[in-house]
Amino acid sequence: MFTQISPKISAIPTTLITGFLGVGKTTAILQLLANKPKDENWAVLVNEFGEIGIDSALLDGNSNEKGVFIREVPGGCMCCASGVPMQVALNQLITKSKPDRLLIEPTGLGHPKEVVEVLTKGKFQETISLQSILCLVDARNLIDERYTKHPSFVQQLKVADTILAAKADTYSAQDEENLSSFISDNKLTDKPLHLMQQGKIDPNWLVQQPKTVIVSKPIIGIAASSLQESSHEIEIGYKKEREQSQALQTKLAQEGFIELNNHGEGYFSKGWVFSDKYTFDYQQLITLITSLSLARVKGVVITEQGSYSFNKAGSEFSCNKITDSKDSRIELIDTNKSALNNLTSEQLLMLKKDFL
């Protein structure tokens, strides 16, 4: 049955952290979690374009902090007009964690306006206190029209109340000039701009005035007057989520891996989940991953050397050891659907280690 959020849970300080693919949102959230007050519960709702759910696994595997609760909404559906998948996940997350602070990371290809509307209207209006919307942008990408002309990229900056220049320690003088010109040309000069290095967000940027967003038309499935009008859709959402999860877990147990695909906003994704019975050859896997020429490749994998996370955005590649991983997950994202076929499940399975 649908569980209504307790009326005692109200005005949760909330920050929306947006930014295009590969800009470093998850790294920034990890930095925040590592420095949160020890006596507070923090909740993180993360949405990804791909169906696999890499970021939530990465956050789980890297955060050793107590009082951290993480929930994912896969497939980019947090930003859809009805927001039902988001409402289901958010309701469960808040009920479980009773957070002192909530961080929300929409997909890099999503439209945050829809997320903001869900948070500031209807049933979450009293539960959520949306205090800040931060948008990360990498100035090095401002010469690439795949970014600057993409509707999601532009809307993320327009909706934000603070712009964070991510990876600023890597900028050239020309990058900084391009950033200044882009902000001026797009009439964003009224928004505070901060340079950010190594994913470090100043906690003071999280605390701003709560905002109310006025929209021209009601959100589908969100009642402005009462919870009851939307509870039926959320109950259906709960049931659908349970059925999908059970079906995927059954397939994973039977076949050892799952392959899932998604598309939208001009991009395509292809990803896999491999059960923990598979251990991959670290060196061979990294060699294969770094050879791929795709917009984004990321994953969390179990290898003979331990569990690792990796991230490849364009030509940049990073790989870090993590505490643990319950399975292995790999996701590819690109504008060219056929390019995703450069990696197959058969190739990956050839890299697994066999132990006697």
Image: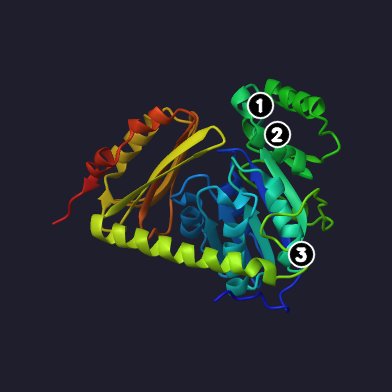
Q: In this rendering, is residue 89 above or below 153?
A: below
Contact between marks 3 and 1 (CB within 8 A): the answer is no
Q: Is residue 154 visible?
A: yes
Badge 3 amino acid? Gln
Residue at mark 1: 149
* x and y percentages locating residue 275 in the rendered image: 30, 57
Most foreground residue, 353 or 267 = 267
Q: Which mark is residue 125?
A: 3
Badge 1 amino acid? Lys
Residue at mark 2: 154
Contact between marks 1 and 2 (CB within 8 A): the answer is yes
Horizontally, is 312 left or right of 177 in the view?
Answer: left
When asked about the image quadrant of residue 71, the answer is bottom right
Q: In this rendering, is residue 99 above or below 44?
A: below
Task: Say which quadrant the N terminus sits in.
Answer: bottom right
Task: Say which quadrant the C terminus sits in.
Answer: bottom left
